[in-house]
Image: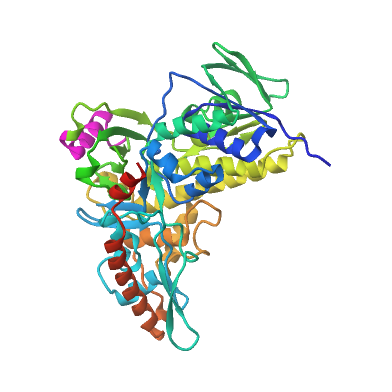
Amino acid sequence: MEVVVPRQVVIVGGGTSGWMTASYLKAAFGDRISVTLVESARISTIGVGEATFSTIRHFFDYLGLDEREWMPECNASYKLGIRFENWRAPGHSFYHPFERVRVVDGFGLTDWWLQLRPGDRFDQDSFLMAALCDAERSPRYLDGTLFEQDFVERDGQGGYRTTLTEQHTQFPYAYHFDAALLAKYLTGYATRRGVRHVLDDVVDVALDERGWIDHVVTRGSGALHGDLFIDCSGFTGLLLNRALGTPFQSYQDTLPNDSAVALRVPVDVARRGMRPCTTATAMDTGWIWTIPLYERIGTGYVYASDYCSPDEAERTLREFVGPAADDLEANHLRMRVGRSRESWVRNCVAIGLSSGFVEPLESTGIFFIQHGVEQLVKHFPGDDWDPRLRDSYNRRIAGCLDGVREFLCLHYRGAARSDNAYWRDTKTRPIPDSLAERLEQWTAKLPDTETIWPHYHGFEPYSYVCMLLGLGGVPVRPPAALGLFDDTGAIKEFELVRDRVKDLVERLPSQRDYLASMR
């Protein structure tokens, strides 16, 4: 029997979330649904969501977009991980790379690193990405092929063999891009595929007798009717929170940063170069992001307003950037950190900031958009609006947001830095009960699949391991069992990492040169 589905979708809000949603729905359903997107010409994209992590490739692949086409249009660059500076102590840095931990005799190479200490830096000794970031290398050769990754495996005859495979590794990069340019690019993609674009202000939301959304009222275009309404109105939550009254659950008790100030800094990439990573530099009342794009640097100070005023934050950011910040306009914003109690209520689904947001420390803003629309396609309602689909969707979205919250809480609780009131308070501020229990476990054994947040949230055990080893504020130790193992395989793997790093740094082009070749 044919299942009848809602045919008319109305998206309220444009920007990255609105146009990513419209594009994905059209790629999934084509002309079998109609999509109308209404956005105000007076509201601009916030523009802080310029860094992503590696799952974003699934979005572009699903839309059938080629890097060589969309990346130049969006001033995009590659991102191999995040560089954390000054979180343990001034002058200290480490990487959280897009690279799973190699395994030797059933134990991660990071466990072996704790046991053998082959060098001073777990990230440089155990992963390839740290050196590639430091050397500003592209993950692709000039002919477009992706670099290979080596792994050691037992050969079944008492020896070891080297394999070239991506089976054991996460896809090795994500992107930085100009969020406003991406929204513009996706506007063209979506409208060419039939999305109706209405440039107008929504001035009212009309509910029917059941309390469902019947239509939205625009200032100049009248009523826009639909079956399913998608709220991409950002922190305003115009449909979900205001019209439908869905409560918002704050994360502010555990994640105190609630404000940001951002600058768009022009840069000569031919002179400066481009490190292929996001940099998060710890400051007195928060941290500063540095995102290298092809023609500029996106930078901003995320801070807690209880400890710092907007003027102080802007002054700190300008001093951090230096003379290049002179005469640049600063963009101040207040962040709503937390999530709506449900992201799907009646015939309304919130995607993006209206659904939920944690601070951009791990570049999850665009990931939440992608995850929300992917799950919407998987849970798309029929004409009976089966509540089990809605409930399943809400569980997955809530589990994802709550999991990222817990992971970010680890960054502050785990940071060894404690040189002022802000950083001392991060050690005593409440954390989720589940994280407190996990921290106790992790002091005896590094995180694994059984001891991290159990629901999908984009992060794997190796991410937690990297943060614990890099931040330095939580005592960790190697498994006692490693003292009973032959360490030959682990030593060989560390040697392989060193050899491959040297080879790749010599052979891979710089990110600047590779991106220039795209143009």
- Where is residue 218 shown, x and y percent of the image? 56, 15
Camera sees residue 216: yes
- Where is residue 380 shown, x and y percent of the image? 67, 39
Left or right of residue 167, residue 316 in this image: left
Q: Residue furthest right?
A: 1
Choose between 241 and 96: the one closer to the eye: 96
Left or right of residue 264, residue 21 in this image: right
Quadrant location of the N terminus? Answer: top right
Q: Residue at x 26, y 26 (%)?
A: 329
Choose between 112 and 452: the one closer to the eye: 112
Picture layout, residue 160 above or below residue 132: below
- Where is residue 137 shown, x and y percent of the image? 30, 55
Quadrant location of the C terminus? Answer: top left
User: Magenta region's main secondary structure?
Assistant: helix
Picture layout, residue 143 above or below residue 6: below
Q: Residue furthest bottom?
A: 157
Whether the magenta-drawn stretch holds residue 322 is answered as yes
Camera sees residue 473: no
- Where is residue 70 shown, x and y percent of the image? 44, 39
Choose between 246 and 192: the one closer to the eye: 192
Q: Residue at x 72, y 24 (%)?
A: 210
- Colouring chosen for the image of the structure: rainbow
Q: Residue at x 37, y 78 (%)?
A: 490
- State how many labels appear: 0
Residue 482 figure quarter:
bottom left
Residue 321 figure quarter:
top left
Left or right of residue 199, residue 94 in this image: left
Picture layout, residue 60 above or below residue 212: below
Residue stretch in magenta: 306-323
Q: Residue at x 56, y 29 (%)?
A: 192
